[in-house]
Amino acid sequence: MINEKLPKMWYGGDYNPEQWNAATMEEDIRMFKLANIDIATVNVFSWALIQPSEDSYDFSGLDAIIERLTKDNIYICLATSTGAHPAWMAHRYPDVTRVDYEGRKRKFGGRHNSCPNSPTYRKYAAELASRLAERYAKHEGLVVWHISNEYGGYCYCDNCAEAFRGWLKQRYNTIEALNQAWYTAFWGHTFYDWAEIVPPNALSEEWAGNRTNFQTISLDYRRFQSDSLLDCFKLEYDAIRKYSKDVQITTNLMGTYPELDYFKWGQAMDVVSWDNYPSLDTPISYTAMSHALMRGLKSGKPFMLMEQTPSQQNWQPYNSLKRPGVMRLWSYQAVAHGADTVMFFQLRRSIGACEKYHGAVIEHVGHEHTRVFRECAELGAELVKLGDELLDSRHQSKVGIVFDWENRWALDLTSGPTIDLKYVEQVHRYYDAFFKHNIQADMISVEEQFDQYEIVVAPVMYMVKPGFAEKVEQFVADGGTFITTFFSGIVNENDIVTTGGYPGKLRNVLGIWAEEIDALLPSQSNEIVMNATYGELNGTYSCNTLCDLIHSEGAEVLATYGTDFYKGMPALTRHAFGKGKAWYVATNGDEAFLSDLIKRIVDEQGIRPLVSPVQGIEVTERVKGEHRYLFVLNHNADATEVDLGNLAGTDLLTDQEVSGKHILAAKGVMIVKH
Amino acid sequence: MINEKLPKMWYGGDYNPEQWNAATMEEDIRMFKLANIDIATVNVFSWALIQPSEDSYDFSGLDAIIERLTKDNIYICLATSTGAHPAWMAHRYPDVTRVDYEGRKRKFGGRHNSCPNSPTYRKYAAELASRLAERYAKHEGLVVWHISNEYGGYCYCDNCAEAFRGWLKQRYNTIEALNQAWYTAFWGHTFYDWAEIVPPNALSEEWAGNRTNFQTISLDYRRFQSDSLLDCFKLEYDAIRKYSKDVQITTNLMGTYPELDYFKWGQAMDVVSWDNYPSLDTPISYTAMSHALMRGLKSGKPFMLMEQTPSQQNWQPYNSLKRPGVMRLWSYQAVAHGADTVMFFQLRRSIGACEKYHGAVIEHVGHEHTRVFRECAELGAELVKLGDELLDSRHQSKVGIVFDWENRWALDLTSGPTIDLKYVEQVHRYYDAFFKHNIQADMISVEEQFDQYEIVVAPVMYMVKPGFAEKVEQFVADGGTFITTFFSGIVNENDIVTTGGYPGKLRNVLGIWAEEIDALLPSQSNEIVMNATYGELNGTYSCNTLCDLIHSEGAEVLATYGTDFYKGMPALTRHAFGKGKAWYVATNGDEAFLSDLIKRIVDEQGIRPLVSPVQGIEVTERVKGEHRYLFVLNHNADATEVDLGNLAGTDLLTDQEVSGKHILAAKGVMIVKH
Amino acid sequence: MINEKLPKMWYGGDYNPEQWNAATMEEDIRMFKLANIDIATVNVFSWALIQPSEDSYDFSGLDAIIERLTKDNIYICLATSTGAHPAWMAHRYPDVTRVDYEGRKRKFGGRHNSCPNSPTYRKYAAELASRLAERYAKHEGLVVWHISNEYGGYCYCDNCAEAFRGWLKQRYNTIEALNQAWYTAFWGHTFYDWAEIVPPNALSEEWAGNRTNFQTISLDYRRFQSDSLLDCFKLEYDAIRKYSKDVQITTNLMGTYPELDYFKWGQAMDVVSWDNYPSLDTPISYTAMSHALMRGLKSGKPFMLMEQTPSQQNWQPYNSLKRPGVMRLWSYQAVAHGADTVMFFQLRRSIGACEKYHGAVIEHVGHEHTRVFRECAELGAELVKLGDELLDSRHQSKVGIVFDWENRWALDLTSGPTIDLKYVEQVHRYYDAFFKHNIQADMISVEEQFDQYEIVVAPVMYMVKPGFAEKVEQFVADGGTFITTFFSGIVNENDIVTTGGYPGKLRNVLGIWAEEIDALLPSQSNEIVMNATYGELNGTYSCNTLCDLIHSEGAEVLATYGTDFYKGMPALTRHAFGKGKAWYVATNGDEAFLSDLIKRIVDEQGIRPLVSPVQGIEVTERVKGEHRYLFVLNHNADATEVDLGNLAGTDLLTDQEVSGKHILAAKGVMIVKH
């Protein structure tokens, strides 16, 4: 992501001078320079200012902002402002506002409030993007386009209903094929005309957000809405590209946000950017996984950290301050996982409306003599020092963990066998097990090439889409290690069960048959009893949530259940298939089990940790050409010793040579070039 | 319920071959024969298939299904499919969809989605029933009609509003009488014209489902909606009866379902059928009570067990598998309480939509080599062996427990004195006390003849309808034992308080006056202190929820409160009235109290248990002519000894002679003919 | 509040003879006389009876009621009945019903159901008030007007939207000023035309009742709705005043009810009245605070206790009986805090609809031989004995505690830093600390004169309106003691942050700067470590919720934080300013801290308790001319000793001389004239 205009890790963030006067902006810029801030995201929510009425545009304010910033060598991330439509538009053209899940037509208010299939919205959003591109494409200060803001939210209006019918015709061609795919013979749902189809919401097939009578209808509506919003992005993308040939275009994503199929979105973006808002109690490995997922959207390409808070948030129930050093530590965590920018929401705190208690580089007090500003300025200086050293470096992981939004939707929508099965939590449990062993893992789509990995894990791979099982078989046959779990291989891409025995198309490679699936009450548990000692993997572990009752069909049984009527049935199997192995974890084992299991598998595979694991120490590595950059992050509240072993190199932050045992300060960071 | 075509306990269930192809149906029938399945409920949700448009009907698919099943001696329970209207109908005639509690007009989706007062729905539902009857009435395979499916759900549309006004005119004749009954002088609610009346929902008098400003309006709306749905049933009933003179007609009920007054429904049905879906943690005695209630709808006539799952459900939060033996045990529990059929939902698992994780005789794997199928086949063989032996046998209970839906509605709707009073729970507490002592009890309506019982219990008989108090007085005067509780005798059939002192019309027979009613916080309790030793009933018990502050007016005071300012006031009284006794339980005693109280009363009455009680062993008895059939069911996870005493007979399941002490296997069943 | 017609503490309450027949009314009046009941509130919900159609009025029923009561010297509190519009009106003029928070148009039902900006409602409500006034203004029995009933609830209809725009034009004059005040540069919300503005509810800016995107819009809507309802009150007030020149007019308020700015309402009423409905677990000091607040609405003028229950309520989850003596005790508690009447809801229990289980002087049994009636009659006799002795006496408090509805709304609406900050709870915590030390406190508005107090406390004075900071500075400069807390001085009257450092305009008087605000998880706490011993205030206390990270700018640091990265920063400061002191409590200290802090401050100030504090004993004092009336109330369940010290006087209830140590019976009361 090296940019010739600003060939370093960009440092800055959202900036809304339209909320302030010129004198304040001067003060801001004075302070930006103190903190080595060199990029500002502007025009995020200025549609109403730029287009004060249907027929008029006024760029004078934005001109002034861009000129003033650029004058002081602060570069521009230029947003298109389409994340919130103007009040006049909602008043004049009600089609721009959404109909919500409860079927209520919304009025003007909030943001992310536009119907993605509103003709008015599409027309004026594209028009605005076009005019912005025409005007600023060649501006020397411009380094990246930022379309809209945090896309999300579904609409259920009549325009969406009609567009949904069109989308369905594209997908199914005939109403008979749709009836087949949607399984409408159930509950007498046969459709004879496309016009009979209505969006699934609280007035028709759904309730409580993700409860539904017809999983496939609901699944298709999620696909359709994700696509509709993506179409809005693409409309603006195309409008910009017409004038701006070589400036990259992004929109800010939100990690594991449920509503959009980000792998599809990643393909449409030049560079991925995202907003990282962990809470005080978010596991470190969850943030790490989110970074890896964002990196995975474009197969490992570095991404932009578009937003994070310098201090506290406002929309959590309890908005803790980031402790001293934590903002820096978490910034480097992003970089460690592939970020090539460090950006904040926001540079100056607003003083009105709902985000006024969201932290900013410049606090309400308005001067630089604050803890928060000092920490920001110190980090700014470090990033100047790092220069372009790390830019465009990549990760070389031996482990890929599959994440799939459609699978997630299907699991969220399923009725039975348990409400306690949460897909993202399951994926995180596996990511975390590798993380704790300092084994770097990529987060990959079902479409990703598997042959670049030694191990591919697909937790709860409930939905097996066309080609996936075949790819897994090829991967294992060629020597790869594949791991999947209970409740996998159940349905096809339309959420229709694959008959003939679970886990359906994965049955062959796994060498097992799951006859039944027991759901445990929260008060219940079972046991995983290892048949023998496999390294650290031995003895008895606890498990809960779901227990597949499986039979081996060739797989080696490594563990069995310890209690209940299926005591003695397999709980963990490994199937030799071609040159590789396919593991099946038949139940939701406890943390110790997962840790020992993953340890066993990576040991078997001969995969070594980057550095010997120490509690609270996170390690990743980026590679560029012949250089390797080892990131060592101390999340502990105390100084902690790490042993770099025979690795020796230079800590880019201190310029000191480091090797062997090293004490890292509380919340400390090392970037060892070796 | 002996049927000449199929003179045995029918065995089978819901079957939806319209979701499958012909080859699969052949496989299914092959397996049905393996399992001795001899009845299939078909056409439950096929309206859209049979009537593809307003003007056309197509019975070819149903013809084929019926022919094919019948060919292999699988009999037909023929549903009318009106449990879900077609999409084209909702599209063309929006009056068929409901307006929900929140006042929202629903679109097409789900099932049980038709407004019961929709002219379109009524017209086409009756038309469909009529055509089905005309076509299949004489079919040799047809053994029972199944109208619609699991009726339920209320509508609040304008058609319902208008029909409600008509229903009210029928009930009250004049608007003045309605004002009187509804107590509209309160809060200035006087109506001067019927047109001013609107349905009570979240837009008018109610909130949160059963909170209301005007109990009587809400009570009448429940009566009206129950009647409206019953009218729909009757419309189809009459349409069928026109062509089908001698085939019995049913619809499947749902046990203690709150929305419909099933005692009224029972009168309109030829035979009661119901769907039994206990959870893993449903008390055994609750299921027993539900069976007894369904039996009581037609004064003890055997009923059909229309649905149960062979293995797991899908719509519970945690859908546990039925443990080995449990499906058989619970099937016999239904028979023990009066079922003359054992039927499942469903014979083959669907592979799409929301019920695909609901268990079935034939699982997704598609073959017979599963635990579930084996258990089903074993039971099927036993039922063949039982033949017609048990059919039409009845229960001879000495105890009747009153259950009344209108009383339940009134209690659900009441504002004060406590939210912790749950009618069904209270009734179950008394049923359970008899159950644990192996004293068989019938569940009866307020209209039932009391003189067939020695003991009549009416827990929380809050609403005393015309004639009820007089019937109780006569029953007790003639020597019966009547038991009622706190918060009884408070209101009339319109939920208007009977002035002059609680418990109103029951005051005379009970010989007490309840001056005040205290509501306890969940953290509070009081004590029931027995005045003397009455068999096992002695010492001090705990009580909570409500404490009536009563004064004896002739009743003997057996216990008093132990604490608080009403310490020493009566907590349990017994009033000698004519030849009998009337008991008043003034507070919600703990489980030990209820157990000891009921033990004391049955001992006093000289009523003996069928078999000496053993924990986890359920016992009932059916009688036909000179034969008595004792059911002994072991709900324990271990083999358990029961002592049949001097009873001797033949276990119909093993043909062995049994008497005295006997070890029953875990989940085991005996049916002793003696 | 001495009234020449009835110069004593009025005793009676709501009475609805329209629900009964004439014979019952005769019985009622017979019993009223037994209980010395001398006032009845009538016509509260009779609009539909009085105006049976648009064109007709019928006062015959009301005439009869008033005549009959007056004949027996029962005086009339005459309500206007506008708390619930007639059904015919809702049917004919849908504009009278509200649109709710979810945007749903309501139908007829409930009460408090009229849109305050409905032209129909305003026209006919004023008309009704006018006709009532014309007819009854001169009636000898009339002693007070009671407009409508428990005003409350917001509407979001189009009429309200239009009226809101008018209200905004009045407030802001120009759309530019509104954009400025509302901070609409945020999220592109700039308005160009008043017509673009819509009410903030679940369809626009808000969700979940008090979550909002734009605090200022939501704040203004609360102001507007409170004003709209107040306008309805004023319309009726003016209509009545036209005919009734000298009878005082009130409406019944509800203590700390959130939706209305009662300080504004108090100014429009001749006398404040309110309905006191504590639960079994409401802290005694919370009820005391509520009385003080109602007294404060008119700067200490005695108020009417318009409603309380004689026994139990119906709308609580658990409606406990008032224990023996409690109704009397709580009646005197009201008097102790400034009530000049003791009135009930209601005199006779209704037998239908939702309030039939609300207690009444005459219970459902219908006669006087009940505990409840006996207690009412005993109190009635005492009030006769007290005569006019206490009427119009006032409180002389040295402490004023600021309460502000706009500040409350702003805090309820704020997004961040914590959801655990509850304004009323915080105010109550301070009130309670004084209460426990027997230091009488007034509840005062931000507009109140501070110079009448030695101490003014303003907990969480988040919103500082124009002139407030200046008033505080003057008060402290002149020698007053001011106390405020964390999260104070943050915003102006439009909820816009005061830049330049928290606590904004209070920074000068407090001598501190709050750099950051940390929000603690519920599981977290910090410590307040006193720097030295200040009387009882010493050692270490626990604190939670919010911790301001402050720097002293002249204030003396009395305590610091004990843990976390801000350990050692000030947690409690005291700033000498002019002749007085300004305290800042930087965090939410535990109960012991608040108790010791307040003890320290009152000791420092030389303020002595009325009587030495004893657990469960409440003490207040009313003063009239040279007479002081000391109220001593024993809330304990046991007799308790109080030490009156050298105070000596006559207990007005027993006519006994009392002084020194005295045993007060459980739930006992003394009123010592000295």
Image (cartoon, coloured by chain):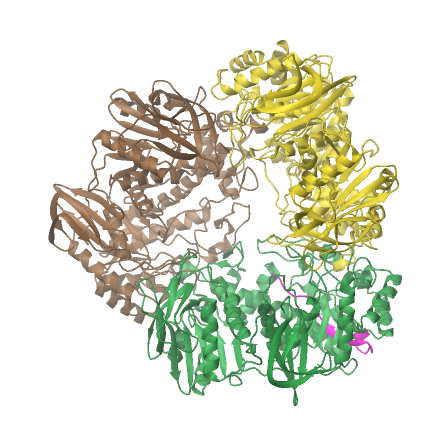
Chain colours: A green, B brown, C yellow
Depicted B310 relative to depicted C622: above or below: below
Q: Residue furthest top?
A: C71
**Which residue is drawn at the image coordinates 26% and 49% (left, top)?**
B333
- Residue range in magenta is A134-154
- Residue in the foreground of this view, choosing between A470 and B661: B661
Quarter the C terminus of chain A occupies? bottom right
Image coordinates for residue B375, horizontal then vertical, percent: 25, 62
> Is residue B374 at all visible to an observer of this figure?
yes
User: Based on the displayed image, in which of its 4 quarters is residue B55 positioned?
Assistant: bottom left
Depicted B334 relative to depicted B418: above or below: below
- Residue in the foreground of this view, choosing between C399 and C394: C399
Image coordinates for residue A201, horizontal then vertical, percent: 54, 57
Q: Is the magenta stretch mostly helix, strand or loop?
A: loop
Image coordinates for residue A332, horizontal then vertical, percent: 68, 73
Residue A511 placement, left or right of C425: left
> Is residue C362 at all visible to an observer of this figure?
no
Image coordinates for residue C610, horizontal then vertical, percent: 71, 26
Based on the picture, tell me whether residue A152 belongs to the magenta stretch.
yes
Q: Residue furthest bottom?
A: A626
User: Based on the displayed image, in which of its 4 quarters is residue C431 positioned?
Assistant: top right
